[in-house]
Image (spheres, rainbow, N blue to C red):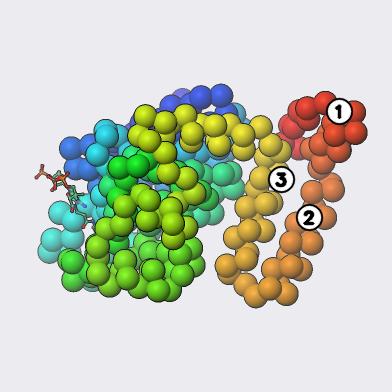
Amino acid sequence: MPQTYETLLLEQRDRVAIVTINRPEKRNALNIKTREEGAALLEELRNDSSVGVVVFTGAGDKAFIAGADIAEFAGRTSITQREVMMGRSLFTAVDTFPKPVIAMINGFCLGGGCELALACDIRIASENAQFGQPEINLGIIPGGGGTQRLTRLVGEGKAMEMILTGQFVDAKTAHAIGLVNHVVPADQLEAKTMEIAQTMARKSQIALQLAKEAVKIASRSNLDEGLRREVDLFALCFSTEDKDEGVSAFLERRDPVFKGR
Ligand code: COA
């Protein structure tokens, strides 16, 4: 029996699961409950073979996620905060998820929301989306991977500017600096996201997982190490039925039917 979640909505379309952070009255701010539920839901989806791709989005038309729930910061000690962050991390759960994860960004994408989007594999934004790491305005710094993942994605100069000024950038700018993959009008956001998600969902589940692993090694090791690991992962594909099916289908001029084996 699937678990039910207080702060999340789950919908499945074919092999694509859409996870909606459902606190629109708080601009989908991430409180402890949402983070815990998000990590638990990902654990469920990881083991669900009917799900090939996960899409994260926010409820309502104003925000993807407006950051950590600031109300929870009030009066919190550093020890308690550390304990909260050392627990099961939603950002790590997204980062290490073996299937593709897409952020469908429908509005404010700030602080922990921007960090969640950064932990995803790709980001698709509506024209009205706004991005920022405004922690500096609260006298703190990003703590969910923002200083690391944003810097790797857009480069040190742009990351420094966003993190040190706390100012927001619009969707067009986010696209220009490589923070998002696509920007589309709000009424086309879902269609564009689903088109990309469904394209991925048709591929071999094993190849997707190994491809993700290989790409992620690129920003976590040096080139020689990365190239060596790529060869190992490439060779591993040759042990799968999906590789035989993909090659046969090409030679027989038909579409492949992958089974994730
Ligand atoms: N944490 C907790 N509550 C938040 C929140 C956050 N990160 N972001 C928004 N909210 C709450 C507001 O307190 C308000 O609650 P209320 O109606 O009970 O007073 C509600 O969401 C709506 O916010 P509001 O500011 O009125 O909406 P807006 O559309 O005018 O502005 C934002 C939206 C996102 C620009 C603005 O709310 C904001 O700056 N939020 C904080 C962003 C931030 O600093 N994030 C990083 C946290 S580390």
**Residue at numbered disc 2:** 234
Q: Mark 1 points at which residue?
A: 253
Q: Would you say residue 94 is visible in this rendering?
A: no
Which SS class for mark 2? helix
Tell me: residue 260, above or below residue 170.
Answer: above
User: Hey, which quadrant is residue 160 in on the image?
Assistant: bottom left
Query: Which residue position is annotated with label 3?
Result: 207
**Residue 222 can be seen, yes or no:** yes
Does label 2 or label 1 sit earlier along the sequence? 2
Q: How crowded is mark 2: few (under 14 residues within 10 Å), some or many (20 or more)?
A: some
Q: Distance between the residues labelled 2 and 1?
A: 23 Å
Given the image, on which type of amino acid does mark 2 rest? Answer: Phe
- Mark 2 or mark 3: whose residue is earlier in sequence: 3
What residue appears at the point 54 percent right and 32 percent down from the top-left corner?
195
Q: How many labels does the image show?
A: 3
* Residue 169: percent from left, percent from top: 31, 57
Quadrant holding the C terminus: top right
Of mark 1 and mark 3, the one earlier in the sequence is 3
Q: How far apart are marks 1 and 3 (CA)?
A: 20 Å
Decide which of 49, 212 is in the foreground and name it.
Answer: 212
Q: What residue do we see at 65% from left, 75% from top?
A: 222
When the figure is inspected, residue 89 is found, relative to residue 56, above or below; the finding is: below
Residue 72 is situated, as x and y percent measured from the top left of the image, at: 18, 55
Q: Can you tell which mark lies on residue 100?
A: none
Q: Is residue 251 left or right of residue 189?
A: right
In percent of width and height, residue 18 lies at 44, 33
